[in-house]
Structure formats: C-alpha cells, structure tokens
Amino acid sequence: MVYAARSARLSFGGPGVKEWGDWLIAATAIACPPARLSRFRGPKVTEHLDRRADTTRVQILRAASRQFARKSYSLVSLDDILADAEVTKGAMYFHFPSKYALASAIIEYRIASARTSIDELLARKLSGLETLIDISYLLAIEDMGDETARAGLNLLQSIGRTDGLQEDVLGQWVTAFAAITRKAARDGDLIADRDPEGIARLLVSMYLGLRQTSSLAQPERLLHDLENIWLLVLPGFVKPDRIAYLNQFIKRRTAVALKKATSL
C-alpha cells in the first residue's frame, strides 16, 4: 500500500516509546525469573497476544472514527477517543503515538475498505460509465451512513495537506477513475477528443465538492444533488446517442440508493 512506509513511521516513532519499551522489558525480567518464563512462550500464546493487540487497535480506530465522523479534527481530543474506546492512554500510544498518526490510520483503513468495495463493483463487468456512476453512489451511501467512511473523508480534507497525504490519496483516486474512463472510451461511449484523466479529475472534484455543498445528514437531498450533477456533466464528455440511456440509469441508481441510504 502507498502508506506502508508512512504507517511504519507513524506507528513507532513517537518520543519516549523506545525508553518505555526498554523499561517494560527490564521490569518483566525482574518480576518473572527465567524458570517461570517458559510457560509463557510458544506460538499459541503469541497468537493470542497478537489477536488481543489487533482487537484493541480496531477498538481504538472505531472509537476515533465515531468522533471524527461527527466533529472536526481540531475539536476531537485524545481524551474523547479514550473514553469512547474504553482503553488506557498507554494502550493507545502503543498503537498510535499521536492524534495525527491515528487520523492517518483511519484514512488508510478507509482507502483499503473502499478499494474492496470498488473491486466488487468492477467484478460486475458493467460498462465504464455505468461503473463510474455506481462508484459515486456507493461513495455517497457509505459517506452518509458509515462512520469510518465519513471520518476518512473528513480527515482527508482537514489534515490531508500535511505531509502530502491528500495529494497521494487523491492521486490514487484520479488514477483509478482514469483507468475506468479509458474503458468507457473503449466502449465507444466518450466523445473522441475528451481526456480520460481530465474527466477523472472532474469526477473526483465533483464528489468532494458535493459533500461540502449538499448535506450528508439528508440522504434524499444529497442523492438528488448527485443525480442532478451527473445529468449536467454527462453531455460534456459522453456521445449524444448514449445520454438518454445513461440519464435513465442514473435515475434508477438514485431510486435504489434512496432505499439503502441511512444517516449517522
């Protein structure tokens, strides 16, 4: 993943972490003589501890997502997250050395889950334009009703300019949309001189702007706004003989999305 190196840096680079770890190792050695340590060794115990650590990490990520989905980055404190997650400060710092590191992990987690959802859409073998439309409705439904999805995009737009994070993520998004747009060109649906990457940038900007100008708390309003934007932009890059079909496709997707959509 693009963020593997960044995640490694964020997860283990905090001040005092190494010293605390050295102290813990020394204290454990004093408290547990070598003869007694043997009963704690072995793959089963290691696996159990790993599972416990993973559970705690997910617990913290979910609690932080609940907070960041509803409040801006600056208004969420670590104490808010700890109270929600019901974990100690030491447990949180074991996984995330700072609030920024935790926020970045939420964005990364959201990218991974979105990629899985999009892969499922691609497996349906729809046309390129149908796929792009479906992805936009999927993003909207998850943005409205899923805490991690909402938090991920909120954080991307609030802290994303730091450390090139937003540029990286949106670059991946544009690249993925451009590949699907090139499929639409091969399908024969695009006007000949239209640039796939330009269309991809337009569609990414379209959704990010929509979540600012519409209302994630009002599914009906947001989905109809999304429909109207699609109806307005399609004539700019789609062949005229495909417009009528795609307009109906969009309206059907709006109707389906309205039945599925929920709000936090």
Image: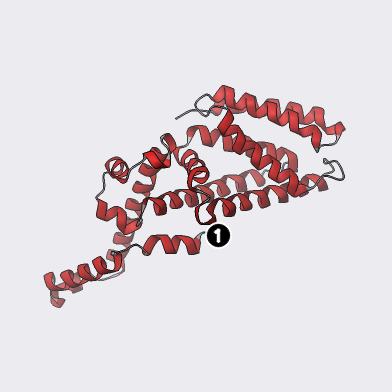
Quarter holding residue 118 = top right
| Residue 2, percent from left and from top | 55, 59
Q: What's the colour scheme?
A: secondary structure
Nearest the eye: 85 or 213 = 213
Where is mark 1, residue-wise?
2
| Residue 9, percent from left and from top | 43, 64
Quarter holding residue 250 = top right
In this picture, is 217 found above or below 132?
Answer: above
In this picture, is 25 found above or below 223?
Answer: below
Query: What residue do we see at 29% from left, 60% from top?
Result: 49
Query: What residue do we see at 48% from left, 28% from top?
Result: 263
Nearest the eye: 132 or 88 = 88
In this picture, is 103 found above or below 31?
Answer: above
In this picture, is 237 found above or below 20?
Answer: above
Kind of residue at disc 1: Val
Nearest the eye: 34 or 247 = 247
| Residue 21, percent from left and from top | 26, 67
Horizontally, residue 85 falls left or right of residue 136, namely left
Query: What residue do we see at 51% from left, 32% from top?
Result: 144
Horizontally, residue 170 falls left or right of residue 22, namely right
Nearest the eye: 118 or 25 = 25
Q: Quadrant of the N terminus?
A: bottom right
| Residue 139, percent from left and from top | 58, 38
